[in-house]
Amino acid sequence: MLNPKDPATQRAMRSMISDQESKIPFRNLRRDFLVASYRAATLSLPILWLDRMSQVAHATEEEGVTSLQAATDRGLNGVFTVRAELSVQGNLHLPENALVSKKLAARVPISSSATFEYVEQPIVLSNQTAGLFAGVARRYKTAAATTTIHQTEYEVKLRSTLNEVAAIRDGTRHIVFSEQGPLSREELDLLKLPVPSSEIDTFLPANLQDLEVSSTYTLHQDALAQAFQLGEITNSEVEGTIRSVSDELIQIELRGDLTGRSELAKIELELVGKLNFDQVNQSCNWLAIGIREQREISAAEPGFDLAATLKIQKFPVGQTFDEKPQISKTGGEIAASKLLLEQRSEHLDFQIQTDRSWYMISDVPGISTMRKIENDQVIAQCDFRKPPRLPDDKQYSIEAFQAEIVQKLGEQLRDLSEVQISSLETTDLLRVVAEGAAEGIPIRWVFLHFSDSSGRRLIATFTMEAGLGDIFADSDVKIAKSLRFTEVQTKNSEAFVGQNG
């Protein structure tokens, strides 16, 4: 494996990056790194400035009682209408080059607000583990966010055609997908609330009914990991305090801090909030929480110091789904096709479907860059470029493609190990695999050339350390089969028509 701190490795990894990237103005590359990968992802971050926390924790009693009254009137089990609001503000921390260094290069201000409304009901496995809670199914009426990054505003909405969503428990995390087709990265991140509505009961103590007013209890690390969807918690000091008890409602205050890890980075949280437990329906029906979060820079995400408020209200209702998501009887396995992401380049006019380890790092005129990242390790990089259209009477040959690759790699090239020509559903494909070395480190390249009947072309260059080939597997083949040219945007159409790929 590569050692990212080794100077020779850093030089080799830099050589893996397309020459095009060095020509992109710093401000554009960093801006697109944010916009493409994180304009919605920031909405999944639980945070809030401490001086606003008390305002959230001490929201009006009437609001909670109103929720209780609605729940008492409808009083049905298991199915809820959920309304949630999330606001975020703070700074993103951008690295100089996340591929080889996590050193801070710039801080970018960000603010965001999001609203959600949906019906939620449990999914239970119906096999030998009968009655086991597997997750929830949701039907969204609203899921939308407005985010401002460095004075530029962006909007993200869940498409109405993908509003049937499942969130399946996998350890302490939820696997979120739509029953109706692949979500985009922005939609996926939009739907990941800091604390999922289905998990707010994890803030409760096991002996809730035995506690009196002013009693305190310590939240277990497993419960906190479940509530905040973290891979692990290394240290925590979070307490709950019973503030009031009646026949209808128990009110709880939450306060403390914790340290843990997401899939990619270390996280530090400070939180304070308020939770209402509905005694009639035996579930939590209201959460208002403020959290300040600091997260380290990772290979796939910027670091940040952000703050947000999250409010969730749950109303028991009688509506149920006609069809629930189909979960395997072997323990909750999900078909791989349901976990694909739809990823789109707005500058090069194409879309693909990938697994969730692929991140769009930048999408700017002339080049789109993606990286396959697992456990904060860069497995491979793919650079997409759009060469000029071919005249109607000409066709790009595999020989010309090989010659271009030989010229591009120069002394780094050792061998062209695979050469293939294929006809896919909507495109013709040329595929060449090259072996070589950079700074003495074995490197493997996979070059793909796509073309269609109209003369449109696209070149994809996958680059990886040769020893990571088993992890990379057939990623390029799967991406190639899914690629579709999209409608040409006027502002992008011929901006780079004079450049060779």
Image (cartoon, rainbow, N blue to C red):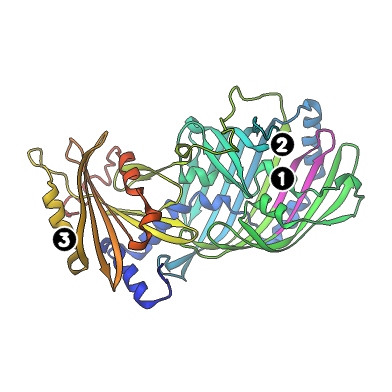
Q: Amino acid at mark 2?
A: Lys
Relative height, residue 207 to residue 69 (above, below): below
Q: Nearer the viewer, mark 1 or mark 2?
A: 1
Residue 464 visible to the viewer: yes
Whether the residues at callouts 1 and 2 have beta carbons within 8 Å, the answer is: yes
Q: Which residues are magenta?
A: 271-289
Q: Mark 3 — residue?
A: 406
Q: Nearer the viewer, mark 3 or mark 1?
A: 3
- Classify residue 136 by image quadrant: top right
Q: Looking at the rendered structure, which numbered label has been put on residue 76? A: none
Query: Would residue 280 appear left or right of 372 to someone viewing this image?
Result: right
- Of callouts 3 and 2, the N-terminal one: 2
Q: Counting other residues with Cα less than 10 Å from the Cα at mark 3, is it few (<14), some (14-19), or many (20 or more)? A: some
* Amino acid on which the number 3 mark rests in the picture: Val
Q: Compute the Cα span from label 1 to label 2.
A: 10 Å
**Circle 3 — which element?**
helix
Please state if 27 lies on the left or on the right of 200 as rendered: left
Question: Alpha-carbon distance for marks 3 and 2?
Answer: 61 Å
User: In front here: 122 or 336?
Assistant: 336
Of residues 6 and 118, the one nearer the viewer is 6
The residue that mark 1 highlights is: 200
Disc 2 marks which residue?
Answer: 314
Q: Choose top left, top right, bottom left or bottom right for residue 34.
A: bottom left
Farthest front residue?
128
Q: Position of residue 488 (x, y in %)?
A: 27, 40
